[in-house]
Image (cartoon, helix red, strand yellow):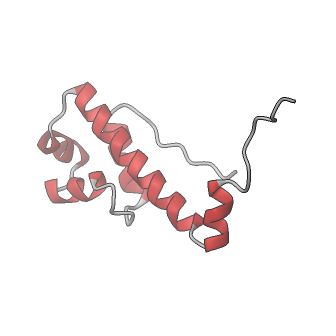
Amino acid sequence: MKKKKGRIGSSFEDHLKEQGTWEETTAVAVKRVLAWQLEQAMEKEQLSKNQMAKAMKTSRSQLDRILDPDNDHIRLDTLTAAARVLGRELRLELV
């Protein structure tokens, strides 16, 4: 007799929802991905942090806050400006 393949029990997402931490965990994950994507794009464009900050018309310390994966208090217009400097666009969607 063959065993059925598949998962047993609930998903990790279900677990986070049960614990009441799904929204917070998702927000942290999104910020970390955005910070990583910005760093990767800067590397591809060969932009230093100082050059990036200057192009954004902001300070190096502000850019460090944007690139800090644990700082989730970044305004959308700031992320949009960073994306624009790198020739990218910021896309958000509700699902």
- Percent of width and height locating residue 83: 37, 40
> Is residue 69 left or right of 64 when viewed as pictured?
right
Number of on-image labels: 0
Q: Quadrant of the N terminus?
A: top right
Q: Residue furthest left?
A: 50
Residue shown at the point (81%, 35%) measured from the top left: 4
Q: Residue furthest bottom?
A: 20
| As drawn, 5 above or below 9 | above
Residue shown at the point (23%, 53%) measured from the top left: 63
Residue shown at the point (62%, 55%) measured from the top left: 12
Residue shown at the point (30%, 55%) measured from the top left: 66
Rendered image quadrant of residue 37: top left
- Percent of width and height locating residue 39: 28, 39
Q: Nearer the viewer, residue 77 or 34?
A: 34
Q: Nearer the viewer, residue 28 or 89?
A: 28
> Is residue 34 left or right of 2 when viewed as pictured?
left
Rendered image quadrant of residue 43: top left
Rendered image quadrant of residue 2: top right
- Percent of width and height locating residue 9: 73, 55
Q: Nearer the viewer, residue 40 or 49?
A: 40
Q: Nearer the viewer, residue 74 or 81?
A: 74
- Percent of width and height locating residue 54: 16, 45
Q: Residue furthest front?
A: 1
Q: Residue furthest right?
A: 1
